[in-house]
Image (cartoon, rainbow, N blue to C red):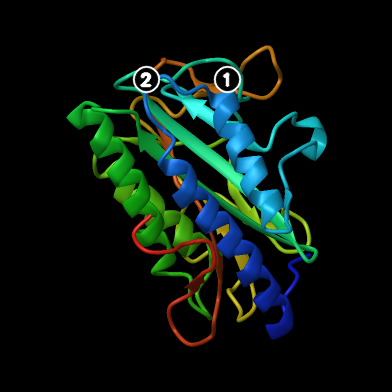
Amino acid sequence: MIIIKSDKEIEKMRQAGLVVADCHEMLADYIKPGVTTLELDRIAEDYIRKQGAYPTFLNYQGFPNSICSSINGQVVHGIPDNTRLEEGDIISVDLGATLNGYVGDAARTHGVGVISPEAQKLIDVTRESFFKGIEFAREGNRLSDISNAVQTYAESFGYSVVRDYVGHGIGRNMHEDPPIPNYGRPHHGPRLRRGMCLAIEPMINEGTYDVEVLPNDWTVVTQDGKLSAHYENTIVVTGKGDPEILTLRGNQ
């Protein structure tokens, strides 16, 4: 069941979303060669708690940390550890914050130091595919209009769109209905309504879209070992045209 949020609920989600946006902005300054992903996790958790929020990912379905840190060919759900980032890596950081009972969720992919033009292009196209998708996040459109726009844009650059993991509704819970694929034919699925809160999250691969899960039962990697990028924001359908992005400040 898709839960439509009231204006009061959306305001609470807006507050949670800004904690997430600000945490991403803060964390970006620490992403450089030599830092460990566990250090990034601790920095993020400390920041979220200082805002009076709770790191949503921590212990969610058994996940052991406050952020997902996915390096290079890792797609999503990378577990922070003592791995040190190296010059030329890319890292996707996904994090959530629960504040006053509501959740914000967003992901960003960063280059570590100087990265290759090819890696930067993948990051840029993944980010832009999100914005191409939400052009269709308007009242009266169908959910798959968003999905199709993401897929069409990403595939126009020769990239592939992950099939096995999708975006989702969001609110009091991090994962609510509806599931939101990043691929598919347009004009299908639920009709978008004012008050729908959605986490749109393109996961775009340099090579094949086929993925597998590592033995830790969490970390998802590309089967061909090629790079993957991830970009996500929590949005709300406004009924006034463009959606509102709840987890974005500036030009993240």
Mark 2 residue crowding within 10 angstroms, few (<14) / some (14–19) / many (20+): some
- The mark found on residue 107 in the picture is none
Residue 84 in sight:
yes
Left or right: 108, with 157 as reference point: right
Examine the rendered structure and indicate whether residue 225 appears above or below residue 24.
Answer: above
Helix or strand or loop: what does disc 2 sit on?
loop
Q: Earlier in the sequence, mark 2 or mark 1?
A: 1
Q: Residue at x 37, y 17 (%)?
A: 86
Determine contact: label 2, label 1, CB under 8 Å: no
Q: Quadrant of residue 7?
A: bottom right
Left or right: 2, with 209 as reference point: right
Please identify the quadrant where the N terminus is shown: bottom right
Left or right: 135, with 237 as reference point: left
What's under tag 2, amino acid-wise?
Lys
- The mark found on residue 226 in the picture is 2
Left or right: 130, with 167 as reference point: left
- The mark found on residue 212 in the picture is 1
Please identify the quadrant where the C terminus is shown: bottom left
x and y, in percent, of residue 217 in the image: 71, 20
Examine the rendered structure and indicate whether residue 204 appears above or below residue 148.
Answer: above
* Number of numbered discs: 2
